[in-house]
Amino acid sequence: MDARRQKALELRRQIEWTLARAVDPGDVLPMLHRLTRLADDGSDESLFANLHLAELLVERHPWRAALYARRVLAHRPNDDRLWATLALCQTLLGHYKFAVRAYHHAVANAPKNPWYAHNLGHLLDVALGRACDALPWLERAYLGASDSGELAASYAHALARTGRLTEARDVLARAPKKAASREHAALLKWVEQGAPADMDHPLPRPAPVHTIAAQLQGTPHVAGGAVRRVDGKSDEESAARRTPDLAEFDGVLARGLASLPLDAKQRARAKSLARDALARFSRPAGTRGQSAVHAVAAAVAYAIVYVDHVPLTQSEVAACFRVRVASLRGRFGEIRAHLDLMPGDVRYATLRRR
């Protein structure tokens, strides 16, 4: 092995080590850029670097992220995660027709993933005004995860726009009770009024294909990004290992999960992962603070998103728990390091990539 390849391998190992422990995954961006220059085009190290650059930059720099995703797709044309990342880039840029084509590729390579079908249908319905074309995809998504309130709302919205009001009412009536909210009630009222076009009601929550900025506007931010004392006790008093207030934590986790497009199996795996993670936390006392409880719960939810290849960003998950993205990233870094999490982890995954 030549010296250049050896340096690339060593740099990749350093990046992987840092990603497992970094409070902010963005800390590795300089190393990833260096690896793209050092590694040979098309090598495993080059693809690794471009893949992570695409996923880390998609929200802040979608145009650049799209370039990195396309570089990897040139070598991995059947990677559904990459197609979904490229689709999100194009959506954030406002290139909806391009995003639709990219989601078609994602669905073709992962036909059992209901979230890709949902995002494709949602784009067709809301962004392009093609509700009739959206219906087959939203129906597929709904049937694949019928216990998701968000998928039910998206499907009902498209049904109503195509004049199938009775079916839309039935779908909303069967939606999980946990999905009930003022927005859900308003959507049902709009359907019962005959779904007038001049009063078209937005969906209860922006789908993953919407811009992050629009979703987070007006969302209260809760402190808790840094690891710090929140219970007022001395270090000596809190040195002993404690079990968090599980009842409070379970409630926060359940409420947040209900706002995410996750099915019953994924929510169950999230609870299992939470038990494993909380048993290993180096600073469990911090979870007693209200803000820290929400941050840890958000990190657990994102861990399932990460493991199961669900096309949601950290910002979208953080918004459902009303925490800062930095808070989620910090706690997720701890959980990922403690449990040695990997995408598709057999302990917690419910979906399988072909």
Image: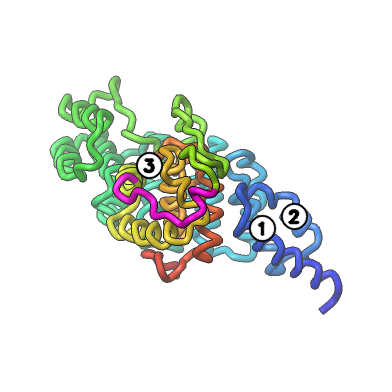
Mark 2 residue crowding within 10 angstroms, few (<14) / some (14–19) / many (20+): some
Q: Is residue 254 above or below residue 157?
A: below
Query: Of the residues tagged 3 and 2, which is closer to the observer?
Result: 2
**Is the Cβ of the residue at disc 2 closer than 8 Å to that at disc 1?**
yes
Q: Earlier in the sequence, mark 2 or mark 1?
A: 1
Q: Is residue 180 above or below residue 11?
A: above
Q: Earlier in the sequence, mark 3 or mark 1?
A: 1
Nearer to us in this view, 75 or 255:
255
Nearer to us in this view, 118 or 247:
247
Q: Main secondary structure of the magenta part?
A: loop
Nearer to us in this view, 157 or 51:
51
Q: Is residue 314 above or below residue 188?
A: below
> Circle 2 sits on which residue?
31
Task: Give the spatial CA distance, label 3 vs label 2.
Answer: 36 Å
Q: Is residue 23 above or below residue 221?
A: below
User: Bounds of the magenta span?
Assistant: 236-248
Q: Position of residue 33 (x, y in %)?
A: 75, 53
> Circle 3 sits on which residue?
122
Task: Give the spatial CA distance, label 2 vs label 1.
Answer: 10 Å
> Circle 1 sits on which residue?
18
Q: Earlier in the sequence, mark 3 or mark 2?
A: 2
Q: Which image quadrant for residue 167?
A: top left
Q: Position of residue 59 (x, y in %)?
A: 57, 41
Mark 1 residue crowding within 10 angstroms, few (<14) / some (14–19) / many (20+): some
Query: Of the residues tagged 2 and 1, which is closer to the observer?
Result: 1
Q: Is residue 35 left or right of residue 91?
A: right
Task: Give the spatial CA distance, label 3 vs label 1.
Answer: 36 Å
Q: Position of residue 91 (x, y in %)?
A: 51, 40
Q: Amino acid at mark 2?
A: Met
Magenta span includes 109: no
Q: Amino acid at mark 1?
A: Thr
Q: Residue 346, can we see it?
A: yes
